[in-house]
Image (cartoon, rainbow, N blue to C red):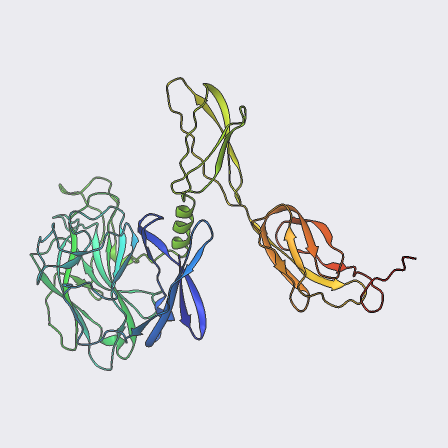
Amino acid sequence: VTLHYEQDGETVEVTANRISGDYKSGEYKATIPGDAIAEGSLTYYWTLNDFGNNEVQTDDYTVDVKPGITVGYFEDFETAPVGWTSYGDNDSWEWGVPESGPEAAFSGEKVYATNLSGDYASSMNASLLMPPVDLSDGNAYLQFKHWHDFEKYSSGFAYDFGYVYVSTDQEEWTQHLIVEGTSDGWEDAEVDLSEYSSERIYITFNATSDSSVTREGWYIDDVAISDSSLNLTSKAINKDQKRSVGMMAGLDMIPNKPAVNPALSVPAMPEKGEAAAEKDASLAQLPMAAKVSVLESGRSVNTNPQDGSYALMHATGTFTLKAEAYGFESAEQSVEVAADETSTANFTLQELPQGTIQGTVTDEATGEPVEDATLLLVEDANVTPVQTDADGNYQLTAYEGTYTLKISARGYHGQEAEVTVDGDVTVDFALEPFYMVPGGEIGYDDG
């Protein structure tokens, strides 16, 4: 499944990930980079290609693209928040009704939380990213309600934290707020954004944890961008405050547990190529039509193309099974068949690489290109024959291997050539024309 969108007059492709369901009925997600979207409108469409190489294209869709949020923005999370995304290591950020932590939103029913129904994960570095923020000239403040319970002890040592980071390019992030310990119910928090006046910025709520001991985490509600400060005296630590980090003995310390310096924390970013890797893994598990044979007895059975399953009754003993399918490398494995038992042998076949055969067809006598000559691979009827264009050029694609390439054209003797496809191959033909008497007819005298 691929998403196609228009950018600067060109079509750009983004591979989609299946996030739920299966190959027969699934939900797919593709992300368009923010810097590829300009204010105005965005046109896109989807293409779907199944394992039988059948492609379907949807209609074009056009959506309005609004500018970034700015002063006056308010989100209470009662409806699905537009433009909010999460990512990172052991990301468990969720939107919905809280069943743990405060067990209720500050207002309404819904919040964003590191886990709506339990503790956050160990070794977490997960970010909740707001929609892009376009600030005008003047003061601006990020304000929100939050409830938090991070790992911290009465000695003052903390190991898990919440942060608010700001970036102008989504590459370099500046830490503006540190959240630690346990709040006294829902509390106000504020970050001064005035230094970013007249800029587009990105704001992320980042939560981190070490390798052991977890708590109920961070719950966020009623996020606003205002031009006036709340003038808070907050337990949260802003970027200008100093804090000491070290090791000390204490009854509530965990022996030999490394200290964590929140000032050195860096938010995780989405890994490039991660989506492609997940796609490859899921494609490898798609069912397919194949033939499974017992080499010693010659018995064989075809798999069910809907789920890839097969079954075969056979005498007892140890045998070699071979699975093969068009366009895939065959695979073999040994299986022992016992009396009154079922033996299982699963196969994952790897698709063969493909190559391109191309070239030019000309008239042997004149050197002129030959148009509408037909070329085909004798050994592979699945490869559709092609015709040469007005310049005598042709091109066809086939799986790697050795074939007989056959050519025919009206008014010319046919030819064949052996060709080995290993990447891209060029094969040119010079065809010998039929020679005829003037007038185009063969004449003879019978007496």
Position of 7 compared to 372: left or right? left
Q: Quadrant of residue 27?
A: bottom left
Q: Is residue 58 above or below residue 156?
A: below
Q: Residue at x 20, y 43 (%)?
A: 213
**Occupied quadrant, residue 407:** bottom right
Q: Hey, which quadrant is residue 196 in on the image?
A: bottom left
Q: Position of residue 220 (x, y in %)?
A: 15, 60
Rendered-image quadrant of the C terminus: bottom right
**Point 24% across, 40% down: residue:** 256
Give residue 369's position: percent from left, percent from top: 72, 67
Taking the view exactly as shown, the residue that stands out farthest to the bottom is 137
Give the x, y percent position of residue 249: 17, 43
> Which of these two is toward me, 89 or 77?
77
Look at the picture and state if 183 lies above or below 255.
below
Q: Is residue 182 left or right of residue 376?
A: left
Please give left or right for residue 81 compared with residue 309 in the image.
Answer: left
Residue extending farthest right: 447
In what quadrant of the picture does the N terminus appear? bottom left
Between 309 and 127, the one lying in front of the other is: 309
Position of 432 relative to 118 (above/below) = below
Q: Point out residue 2 in the picture as x, y percentages from the top left corner.
A: 40, 59
Apparent side of residue 42 relative to residue 241 in the rendered image (left or right): right
